[in-house]
Image (cartoon, rainbow, N blue to C red):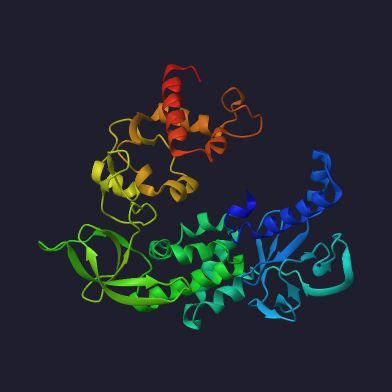
Amino acid sequence: MLLVKDVTLGQFPARVAVGFMLREVLATGETSRAELARRAARFKHVAVLRPDGYLAWVPSGRTQQRVAPVEWRDGAFRAHGFELGRFYDGRTGVFRLLDAELRESNGFPIADVHDDADVISRGLDGAEEAFVGLALAVGKFFSTSPAENLEAFRQMPAAVVALIESSPEYLERFKYMTRGEQIQATSKMVTNLIATWGTASAVTRTLHGTSLATAEASVLVLSGRGVLSMESVAVPVGRAAAVLSGGPGAAIILQRAGGGGGGVSGATSTSGPTGGKSYSSFKSFKRAMGRAGPGKEWHHIVEQTDGNVGRFGPKSLHNTENIVALDKDLHSKISALYSSIQYRVTGSRTMTVRDWLRGQSFEAQRDFGLRALDNVRKGAW
């Protein structure tokens, strides 16, 4: 089965380790589950060189640091002192080569195990000196954000998000960069956008034309290698796009078909995925809908947490199907429920209801939100 499945960069370290263990089993014969677990534990601090020239840890697949491009040299694919397909121990702060029995081959250190995410220097590497403050702000954001960097970048300026999401090739490459390179690339992109268009924000618009099926537009394109270019292309009328600045020099970033523009912050409202009227922010919703009413407050059935905005997009949350007007007292009780620990609801004695919901799907959170609304109203919860 392994032979017929494609190997991705993220899976490569684990696949090398699995191949190693399979060869051991073929050589030694039938092995118990406990013994397999013991053998797998040997890879806890072990890294491999990936084909793209990066070192990554076997258990998690996490990228640690960049070495160099892999080249065929001396009968093997190598990058500096590392060889493709070999294991390296990094538990002591330096990488050492392991032999066929996962023991230190010669004890010589090959390279330091270093943290690539140097926020300040990486941020400055991707920005001009005139934008030092901006670069440091970008770096600080990544350094204080959750570990999931893809969730973090979705909360960056909308134009950057739209640009990266518009290039599937670059997005795939971005996922496997080291944390420091993600800081540098994002900082550079934000700086370039501001230097050229004077803004890093983007407004979602639908392209219009005459009776023709296409419209001529200047499109900002991000290549798989991270190179920005401007191209004049024929775009289907009705296609959603993120518009940078205004006037005759405006550029657009085409949103991916079917993407719905969930990750782009815009001011216009469109029909949401559930059929209701949706908006790009809660502020836009309230501007259109007005106050909830005397003694009432607006309530999101699926909460507008940062995680939910990143996963589902703002238009799925700021939607007339997801926001209802509740009495202030009822709204306060529901908010208190989400902040409390409810063992009979979650089965956990340490996790709040909000934390329990965090990783669940939009549908599951909505179902719970409706049940919570009904039960709190009845006094059952």
Q: Is residue 59 left or right of residue 148?
A: right
Name the one closer to the observer, 282 or 301. 301
Q: Is residue 227 left or right of residue 354?
A: left
In percent of width and height, residue 336 lies at: 51, 31
In percent of width and height, residue 99 lies at: 85, 65
Q: Is residue 321 left or right of residue 351?
A: left
In percent of width and height, residue 48 lies at: 72, 64
Residue ID at (58%, 63%): 176
Whether 108 is drawn above or below 238: the answer is below
Q: Give the number of marks.
A: 0
Whether 1 is drawn above or below 242: the answer is above
Q: Is residue 207 left or right of residue 353?
A: left
Name the one closer to the observer, 277 or 108. 108
Residue placed furthest toward the left: 211
Whether 227 is drawn above or below 63: the answer is below
- Quadrant assignment, res 43: bottom right
Residue ID at (42%, 33%): 366
In percent of width and height, residue 127 lies at: 50, 78
Residue placed furthest toward the right: 106
